[in-house]
Amino acid sequence: MSKVKAKTLVVGVNSDELFPPATEFIPIVMGIAEAKLFAYDSMLGHLGNIQDIDKANPVILQFLSQVSKDK
C-alpha cells in the first residue's frame, strides 16, 4: 500500500464485527501516505456500512470536493 499515491478516504464502522477496525481499515489508513479515515458508530455492526452510510455522506462529499479542487 505504500506505493499508493492517490488521495484516499477510508470509511469504516467502529463496531464492524466482520471487518474489525484494528485488523481491517486502520492498517489500510496507516499504510497509505496521507490517507484520511472516517470511522463512525453504528448499532448495526457490519450492516452499518449499508444502513447508516448517510453518516459518512458529508465527509465523502467534502473529500470528493477537495480532490476535484486539487486537480
Image: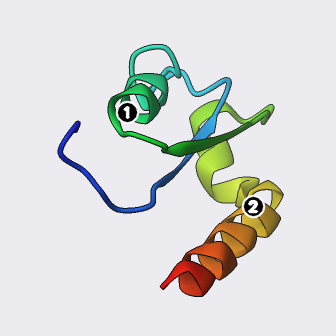
**Label 1 Cα neighbours within 10 Å, binned few <14 / some 14-19 / many ≥20:** some
Q: Is residue 20 left or right of residue 12?
A: left
Q: Is residue 61 left or right of residue 19?
A: right
**Foreground: 46 or 1?**
1
Q: Check the image and report above or below for 59 versus 46.
A: below
Q: Secondary structure at mark 2?
A: helix
Q: Which residue is mark 2?
A: 59
Q: Position of residue 32 (x, y in %)?
A: 35, 39
Q: Residue furthest front?
A: 70
Question: What amino acid type should be assigned to the residue bearing mark 1?
Answer: Ile
Q: Quadrant of residue 63?
A: bottom right
The color scheme shown is rainbow
**Label 2 Cα neighbours within 10 Å, binned few <14 / some 14-19 / many ≥20:** some
Q: Check the image and report above or below for 7 versus 28.
A: below
Q: Position of residue 47 (x, y in %)?
A: 61, 44
Q: Position of residue 34 (x, y in %)?
A: 48, 43
Q: Quadrant of residue 8?
A: bottom left
Q: Residue at x 56, y 85 (%)?
A: 68
Q: Secondary structure at mark 1?
A: helix
Q: Residue at x 80, y 31 (%)?
A: 43
Q: Is residue 20 left or right of residue 33?
A: right
Q: Residue at x 75, y 61 (%)?
A: 59
Q: Position of residue 27 (x, y in %)?
A: 39, 23
**Foreground: 2 or 27?**
2
Residue 28's disc is 1
